[in-house]
Image (cartoon, rainbow, N blue to C red):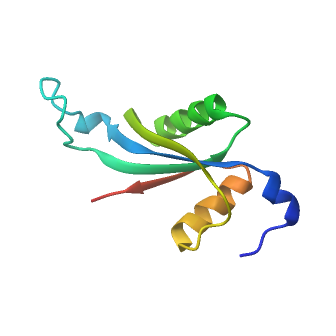
Amino acid sequence: MSREPEIEETTVYIVVGRAFREDSQPDPVDDDDETGAIAINVLLTAADDEECLQKALQALAGQGFVRVELDRVGIIEGEPDDPTFASAYGNAIDGQVAVIAFHG
């Protein structure tokens, strides 16, 4: 999938972490409890880190996640080879927020 040259100027962020749905809240007594955690990656474009985080959290809330623990925020430099990430990257370039949830 080849993109137009002007897209190279677009910054595509990736947000990595874990998310929880309402029915899978961890035990409040055990801070290390990962019960119900779903690994997530969010790809999107934004003007800066703050906007990136706001858009990612809004998209995750829209997908029914009620709690999110973020591990990393980074920038993707070039279209990924992996088809899942390449598709999400293309969606991000097109202005969408792509949420990838890894259900175990």
Q: Is residue 43 left or right of residue 103?
A: right
Residue 15 screen position, x and y as percent: 51, 44
Taking 25 as reference, is 99 above or below it? below
Relative to 90, 24 lies left or right: left
**Quarter location, residue 23:** top left
Most extreme residue toward the left is: 29
Q: Is residue 99 left or right of residue 1?
A: left
When the figure is inspected, residue 57 is found, relative to residue 92, above or below; the finding is above
Q: What residue is at 32 percent from the left and 48 percent from the top?
A: 38
Residue closer to the observer: 37 or 62: 37
Count all numbered tags in the image, as a single digit: 0
| Quadrant for the C terminus in the image | bottom left
Q: Residue at x 72, y 55 (%)?
A: 93
Which image quadrant for residue 69?
top left
Front in this rendered view, residue 55 or 81: 81
Apparent side of residue 2 relative to residue 63 in the rendered image (left or right): right
- Which image quarter is the N terminus in? bottom right
Q: Residue at x 47, y 51 (%)?
A: 41
- Residue 16 percent location from the top left of the image: 45, 46
Q: Nearer the viewer, residue 95 or 14?
A: 14
Where is residue 46 drawn, in percent x and y? 70, 39
* Residue 48 location (% of width, % of height): 69, 34
Q: What residue appears at the point 66 percent right and 58 percent down from the top-left corner?
A: 77
